[in-house]
Image (cartoon, rainbow, N blue to C red):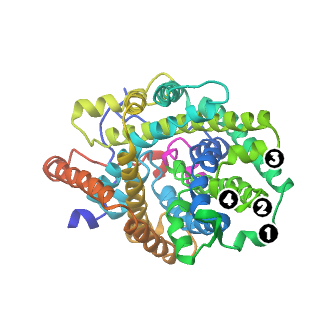
């Protein structure tokens, strides 16, 4: 039990040393603007608006905007936890570096395993959606289109991070334009007033109108909480952000605020502009846009969404390769694996780790991922839960006096977050919980029989020296 409660020493491992004998470091090359562009691209507000929000419309109807607004408020607690921990522990390891330092090595290892599940599954699942939005121009096999997106994202991930900030920034502008078009058209064709946003109505079977209960809204928060999910990318980029003590928190909070506006405003416009309740509950936003304008505008919006998915693939490959890079630098694996994963290419990117994220992701596009996608939902929730626990421990011992951004209303914020995430876990299907629990059990055995007996040479969570100064 001591391993789960005692903070680890921030030892610097000797994996993949440079000529001077120091471990490989990522280059600090981006400021708050570049970091925000990359992080916003991981949120992918346009793809969220067109892919996730329609499911909420089908079950919540006119209460969708209210539910997303409540979920965004709860996400402030998540953002506060990430901001404080990210400035205390600015490492490319992200969640696992923060949790290892605050809650112990075993807890950090389990967080890493949960994040690894997301690393390998979510990008190809999202990438396969590209075919649907390219349909107005060309009909493609979803698996082939998804694999192509993953290969493209992998090639982009091998470039310099500053170049990727500009690439994803251009795509992000198109995303925002698409969301703005939906908002303008929805407000211009309003069929109902602002009071409809709290009218709590949804179209039922047989053309009847049903009332959305408070319990349905609470259940909908399980999805709404993750509508703006992605701002956590800023902590993965903390080793490459200039002045991380200041810019990590600014990037996290700015991304949450901007993404909430980009998503919530069009949702309000759609709620007010849908021709009737059945159309709103159907959630076919592309058809609504075409009805409000013409097919050309509908095609433009669909193409913008396709670009948003490609953009998300690029950013996710960048983010996820940094997780693998950091795990190798922190000696989570046998030595040959550590040396390979910690290699940096000519552009300063971890090229081996990037390939190991992107190439298997392309292959997974040809696999049925329904069950695995459910597992990722449990994994993300469990990961956030452990981050909230780490935030409760962030002000003890030497960390109490470390210069860092500090969240307001501590410890109420992380306590609230723990309660909400525990509820979300209780709403997941039993099979998904069992799959995730089984994987976690295997990871615990790896810890017990390989990592823990080699605690002096394995799983040494490091913080870049310039970040500790």
> Residue 353 in the image: x percent, y percent?
39, 32
Packing grade of label 3 (10 A; few <14, some 14-19, many >=20) is some
The circle on residue 292 is 3
Residue at horizontal 36 percent and vertical 45 percent from the top = 116
Spatial CA span between label 2 and label 3:
13 Å
**Label 1 belongs to which residue?**
194
For the residues bearing labels 1 and 2, Cβ distance under 8 angstroms:
yes
Is residue 251 left or right of 432 when viewed as pictured?
A: right
Position in image of residue 187 (x %, y %):
83, 56
422 vs 57, nearest the viewer: 57
Circle 1 crowding by C-alpha within 10 Å: few under 14, some 14–19, many from 20: few
* Mark 3 / mark 1, whichever is N-terminal: 1
Is-magenta flag for residue 44? Answer: no
Describe the element under mark 3 as helix, strand or loop.
Answer: helix
- Percent of width and height locating residue 213: 57, 76
Marks 2 and 3 in Cβ contact (< 8 Å): no
Give residue 150's mark: none
**Mark 4 vs mark 2, CA separation in Å:** 13 Å
Instruction: State yes or no: discs 3 and 1 in contact (Cβ < 8 Å).
Output: no
Image quarter of the N terminus: bottom left
- Helix, strand or loop under label 1: helix
First along the sequence among labels 1 and 4: 1
Query: Considering the numbered disc 2 on the image, is that residue within a helix, a strand or a loop?
Result: helix
State which mark lies toward you, 4 or 3. Answer: 4
Q: Which mark is residue 278?
A: 4
Task: State the residue position of label 2.
Answer: 272
């Amino acid at each position: 039990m001591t391993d789960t409660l005692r903070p680890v020493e921030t030892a610097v491992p000797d994996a993949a040393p440079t000529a001077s004998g120091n471990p490989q470091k990522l280059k600090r090359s981006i400021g708050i603007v570049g970091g925000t562009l990359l992080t916003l691209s991981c949120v992918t507000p346009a793809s969220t608006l067109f892919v996730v929000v329609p499911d909420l419309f089908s079950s919540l109807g006119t209460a969708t905007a209210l539910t997303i607004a409540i979920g965004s408020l709860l996400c402030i607690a998540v953002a506060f936890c990430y901001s404080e921990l990210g400035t205390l522990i600015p490492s490319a390891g992200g969640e696992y570096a923060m949790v290892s330092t605050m809650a112990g090595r075993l807890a950090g290892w389990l967080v890493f395993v949960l994040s690894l599940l997301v690393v390998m599954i979510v990008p190809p699942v999202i990438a396969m959606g590209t075919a649907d939005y390219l349909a107005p121009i060309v009909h493609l096999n979803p698996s082939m289109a998804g694999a192509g997106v993953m290969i493209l994202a992998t090639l982009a991930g091998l470039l310099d991070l500053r170049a990727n900030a500009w690439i994803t920034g251009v795509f992000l502008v198109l995303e925002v334009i698409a969301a703005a078009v939906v908002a303008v058209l929805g407000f211009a064709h309003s069929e109902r007033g602002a009071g409809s946003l709290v009218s709590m109505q949804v179209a039922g079977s047989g053309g009847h109108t049903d009332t959305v209960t408070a319990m349905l809204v609470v259940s909908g928060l399980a999805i709404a909480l993750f509508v703006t999910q992605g701002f956590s990318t800023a902590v993965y980029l903390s080793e490459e952000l200039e002045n991380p003590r200041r810019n990590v928190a600014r990037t996290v909070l700015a991304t949450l605020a901007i993404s909430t506006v980009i998503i919530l405003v069009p949702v309000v416009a759609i709620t007010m502009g849908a021709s009737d309740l059945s159309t709103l509950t159907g959630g076919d936003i592309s058809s609504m846009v075409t009805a409000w304008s013409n097919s050309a505008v509908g095609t433009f919006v669909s193409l913008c969404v396709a670009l948003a998915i490609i953009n998300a693939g690029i950013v996710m490959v960048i983010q996820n390769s940094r997780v693998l890079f950091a795990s190798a630098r922190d000696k989570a694996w046998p030595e040959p694996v550590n040396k390979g994963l910690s290699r940096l290419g000519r552009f300063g990117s971890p090229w081996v780790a990037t390939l190991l994220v992107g190439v298997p992701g392309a292959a997974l596009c040809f696999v049925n991922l329904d069950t695995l996608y459910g597992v990722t939902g449990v994994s993300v929730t469990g990961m956030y839960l452990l981050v909230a626990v780490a935030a409760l421990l962030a002000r003890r011992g030497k960390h109490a006096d470390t210069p860092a951004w500090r969240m307001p209303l501590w410890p109420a914020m992380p306590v609230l977050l723990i309660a909400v995430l525990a509820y979300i876990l209780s709403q997941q299907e039993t099979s998904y919980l069992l799959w995730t629990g089984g994987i976690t059990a295997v990871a615990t055995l790896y810890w017990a029989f390989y990592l823990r007996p080699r605690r002096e040479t394995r799983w040494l969570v490091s913080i870049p020296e310039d970040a500790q100064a």
